[in-house]
Image (tube, rainbow, N blue to C red):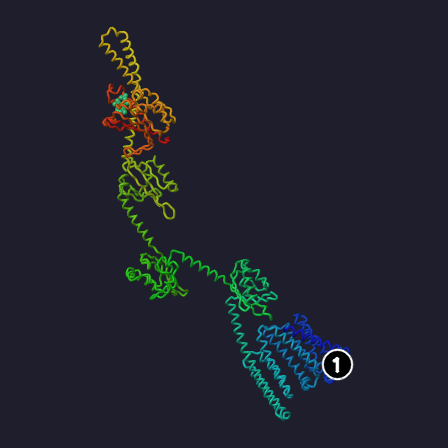
Amino acid sequence: MNNKISTVSAFLITFLGALVILGWYLDIPALIQVHSAFTPMQFNTALGFLVTGLAIICWVQQRLRYLLILSVFLLALSILTGAQYLLGVNFGIDELFVEHSITVGTSSPGRMAPNTALGFMIVGLAGCYHVKGQATSNIKSIILQSLGLLLLSVAALAGFGYLFEIELAYGWAGLTNMAAHTSLGFILASIALISLSLQIHTQVFDGHAINITGLLFLATLLIDILSPEGLEIIVAYPSLILCALLFRPQNISFALALFAIALLTLGYYAVDRVFDPDGSALRIRVLTVFLILANAFIIEQLKKQKAQLQESKTSLELAVESSEIGLWDWDLTSNQVKLSPIWCSMLGYKPHELEHAFATWESLVHPDDLQKTLRILHQYINEEPGNHYEAQFRMRHKNGSWRIIYSRGSVVETDKFGKPLRLVGMHLDTTERANLENELALLKSAVDHSQSLVLVLSSSIENPTILYASHNAQNITGIGSSTLINESPIVFLNQQERIKNKKELAKIRRAMINHQSITSQVWLKRVDTDEVYRLKFNLYPVLSESGETLHYSLIGQDTTKLYQLEQLILEERERFQSAMVHSPIGMALVSIDARWLDVNQSVCEILGYSKAELLQTDFIQLTHPDDLELDLEQVQKMLDRKITTYEMEKRYFHKDGHIVWALLSVSLVWNTDGTPKYFISQIQDISERKLQQERLKRYTEELEQSNRDLDDFAYIASHDLKEPLRGINNHALMLKRGYQDKLDETANHKLDRMVKLSQKLEKLISDLLYFSRIGREKESIKRIPISAIIAKQIDLYQNYISEQNAQVSVANNLPTLLCNELKMSVIFRNLILNGIKYNDNTHKVVTISFDKQFTFQGKILKNVFHIQDNGIGIDPEFHHDIFRMFKRLNSEKAYGSGTGAGLAFVKKIIEQSGGEIWVESTPDKGSTFHFYIKEVDHEAR
Ligand code: ADP
């Protein structure tokens, strides 16, 4: 707006200057003179206006170098002209370009009026000052405005002079007059100057300040002009007003106003009496005095306000600076953003390091936050410019880190349609706060999720209250954390508990009085369940920097379970120790480096040393060298966690030198940090057992040897006896054949008997031989169905079975076994035939059955065969004897012949296989033989 005014004014001025120049060159008086009676505009004046117009255009376009050149030209022109007047000389500049034909109201032809020169001087000064002047924008603005107003005064004075026909107003000291259109040109120039000066300042207020006072100033002048004698004020007052505006001292405006009034009064008394017969000049002067005073008053008020404003602005700036608020000012049309130094330093930059544009902000915002923030921003700009915009996002610091920025701003300028043109706002670095908040949230969550009860108590010792209770207060105390706030911590204890914990409470109170921390434990009762719990806690004062207690913090744990565990451990330890001391078994704690750490009396007795002696030595020294390697190997395995315990029989050296056999059981106790602590060894004296074992082993060996000898003897004897026996038999038969007729009946009978006996003896010896052979020979073993073996035997003896009117029934669940067929045949043949043989029943029945599992006398046996008959039975007295070699219970006459060796074979075969045979029988009712053989165990089907 201001630029437009200046530009239009400048063009008009240039046009005016050009027109007059044209007039001079083309000799057109109408262009030079407004009226033939009026003073013409001199050529130099027209040139001055041409330059003035161009200078203002350069000013508007910020072509400062040209402005300076043109301004210097104007200054030179005005100073030279002024010098000509003052010194009464002629530099020849007046008619340098054209000869002046029109000289109305001119002191020397072509010379511009002194007030015109003053006008150009003001313009030149203003231009030079604008380019070169070093001042704050406010002062600059004031100076330029004042110069503009001064120019306006000079021009307006001349203008009004023409209007009211007061020559003194446009023609000074009888010198050349200012032309009427020159005054117009200067009025335009002053307007341009004032509007340009208004652009410089930053505070709109200042513009108004000068404008108001300026207008009043002008009004005063105009009134004064109306009274032609009051012209002295014209010179005095503008300079006074300038002083009043420029200088700080308070009330200077009034002082200067008084000075002006004094001048006015003096002027009146000097000339007024003659020229003011009707007193109108006096009235006007009185009015002028009022206006001057009003003007001074307004200036003072404005100065005061300005000072205040300056003060608040300074404090605002200080506040902004100290609060580290970065400011931004975004011109939406150009997308330029003014960034304050703090805005830049917040991200580690100097203001000149950043381009002050919206793109800078965009490039620094975290990519993840950019779209979201832009959305908020656009939404604000497009939808609700009335309110303010607010967002939080991350921005990249120069050092690469991300800062969390809070931004807030609002529209300060809109176009006439309400479309935002300018946005102003601030940035606040909230990284630390956000970090703190995060940290706090983490801490809170840690506290809430921990097992500990956290309370913050007020610092009052007499009546402390709970300021904060962690979330888990409910779990531990039974009282919710929100209920606890503002309560006294005594709420946890009822009367009874207060008495119970009296001592502890007194201790706590003492610690609080002394501002000391204390660890304590109290027994409390849950409010909701009446359950008793044990709270162990630390209470400590939280101090301010000056050492004052701000509040107390209490961190506690429910240690009930821990306490119970401790008690249990104590009890266990006691029990262990008493067990150790009193145990009949030797018990010892042995260090990792093999030393005895503790031993009970039994160990001392076993090894023959006193406890003190043992604790001086280690187990390695007392271990028999042959057992040491194995022992240490096991120890190492246990240390390597390959085994947890081990047991071994080993030999120790007794103090008196003899060997002690011991059964050693060792386990290892670990420390909580995973390192081995010590071994627990149980030592049992097994010397006696060992001795017995040795003895038993020896006996068994001897027995086995004697059995082998016996077998050998029986084998050799029966083998060797067979030959002579067969000889005796043959000889007896030969004797009978050769001498049967020659011998009498008794002798024949005796001979027959001899043959029979020798045959029986042979049979006996054969049986004996067979018996002693059982187990000696290698036998073939294969898988055979037992039913097949039985079937074969039945088939072999079918005739006999039929003759005896007997029946053999076989169960159909008999297994297939890995066995020697011949031996199995011997077993079944003997048992089946015995059942038929020793049987008086007209219908003889032998039943063979099988049980995969069979219980006998409380023992669970597997794969048991049963051979049952309905025969004569066996007296229990002989249930064992019948299995002896050659043992027979019945006479040959009644139940036929036999050697009594069958069951002995059966028993030997079965027992050699690891099995067993036994009989259950009741005389006259029948017998049942039961047996199992070991080998069949895993082969059973
Ligand atoms: P042997 O049949 O040659 O006499 P054993 O050794 O087979 O010899 O039998 C020994 C004795 O046991 C028999 O003489 C008989 O008295 C008795 N005995 C064997 N089996 C039975 C049975 N099933 N019932 C009754 N007595 C039996």
x and y percentages locating residue 731 in the rendered image: 28, 10
Q: Residues within 10 Å of mark 1 (few under 14, many from 20)?
A: few
Ligand 1 is found in the corner quadrant, namely top left
Viewer-side residue, 445 vs 629:
445
> Would you place residue 607 above or below residue 444 in this image?
above
Viewer-side residue, 225 vs 761:
761
Element at label 1: helix
Determine the image quadrant of residue 235.
bottom right
> Would you place residue 483 above or below residue 77 in this image?
above
Number of numbered discs overlaid on the protein picture: 1
x and y percentages locating residue 283 in the rendered image: 60, 89
The answer to whether any part of residue 540 appears in the image is yes
Quadrant of the snapshot with the C terminus: top left
Quadrant of the snapshot with the N terminus: bottom right
Which amino acid, mark 1? Ala
The answer to whether any part of residue 884 appears in the image is no
